[in-house]
Amino acid sequence: MYERMLDKEITPSFEELIDYCGERGSAWAALDAFLADNYALGRQIRFPYGKKYGWSVKYSQGSRHICDIFAENGAFAVFFKISGKEIEALGGVLSEYTKTVWERSYPCGDGGWLNYRVLEDEHLRDIKKLLAAKVSPKKSQGGLKQ
């Protein structure tokens, strides 16, 4: 379960990545819409980090890497770096699952790299909170659109 798209020779479309996630594909589409509505982000389909990671969509703001989202069979995984200060700023609003993902993060500087598998709606809500702590919304926005 949660196999990734590992055939480097066949570049999938965004729709194929979403479809591969099964019932969680709609959650990725909702996250993609959230990112498009709230941030000026670029989106690029790529095969990063080596053959075991598979196909992903890289979201970036100019030259700043925001996250990669990897298609998985039955889920998707959001891979990103976040600082301890950004986590602390969220206080106690994160789920126990998210706290566990943070505790298991790969340390880097004052924070860590999270490999966050989204399996339910609560996880999607937390990913939105984490990315909102990491990236400022578009200046023209009056607030975050959910």
Image: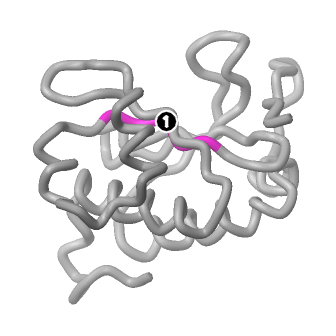
Image quadrant where residue 50 sits: top right
Q: Vertically, is 53 above or below 3?
A: above
Name which residue lies at 31% across and 80% down.
Answer: 144
Residue 51: horizontal and vertical position, in percent? Answer: 72, 11
Q: Quadrant of the N terminus?
A: top right
Image quadrant where residue 33 sits: bottom right
**Front residue (pair 37, 95):** 95
Asked whether 79 falls inside the magenta stretch, the response is yes
Image: magenta residue range = 77-81
Left or right side of 137 for 113 = right
- Residue for badge 1: 79
Q: Which amino acid type is marked by label 1?
A: Phe
**Front residue (pair 122, 66):** 122
Name which residue lies at 29% across and 62% down.
Answer: 132
Q: Quadrant of the C terminus?
A: bottom left
- Residue closest to the far bottom: 142
Residue 9: horizontal and vertical position, in percent? Answer: 87, 19
Q: Vertically, is 3 above or below 117?
A: above
